[in-house]
Image (tube, grey):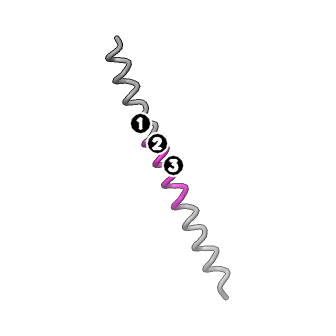
Amino acid sequence: MAEIESIFCEFYTYFLGNVILYDLRTVGSRTYQLHNSTSLSLIP
C-alpha cells in the first residue's frame, strides 16, 4: 500500500507542478501582451 501511495503522491505533485507552471506561463504571456498593447497605444 505504501508503494501505491508514494507513486500517487509523486504523480499528484508532478501534475500539480505542471498545472502551476502552465498557469504562470499563460498569466505571464497575457500580462506581456497587455503591456505591449498598452505601451503601443500610449505612443501617439
Element at label 3: helix
Are discs 3 and 2 less than 8 Å apart at CB? Answer: yes
**Residue receiving disc 3:** 23
The image position of residue 21, as x and y in percent, is 46, 47
Q: Residue at x 58, y 62 (%)?
A: 31
Percent coordinates x, y for residue 29 in the rendering: 51, 61
CA–CA distance between discs 3 and 1?
12 Å
Query: Which residue is farthest left?
Result: 3
Residue under pointer 2: 19
Q: Describe residue 1's horizontal placement relative to residue 30 as left or right.
A: left
* Residue at figure coordinates x 42%, y 43% from the top left: 18
Task: Please determine whether, in this image, residue 24 is positioned above or below residue 37.
Answer: above
Q: Which residue carries the number 1 mark?
A: 15
Q: Which residues are magenta?
A: 18-29
**Distance from the alpha carbon under mark 3 to that under mark 2:** 6 Å
Q: Do tag 1 and tag 2 residues touch (Cβ < 8 Å)?
A: yes
Within 10 Å of disc 1 (Cα), the crowding (few <14, some 14-19, many 20+) is few
28 w.r.t. 4: above or below: below
Q: Residue furthest top?
A: 1
Task: State yes or no: residue 27 in magenta.
Answer: yes
Disc 3 residue crowd, few under 14, some 14–19, many 20+, Cα 10 Å: few
Type of residue at label 3? Asp
Residue furthest to the bottom in view is 44
Q: Is residue 37 above or below residue 18?
A: below
- Of residues 44 and 10, the one nearer the viewer is 10
How far apart, in angstroms, are the residues tagged by discs 1 and 2?
A: 6 Å
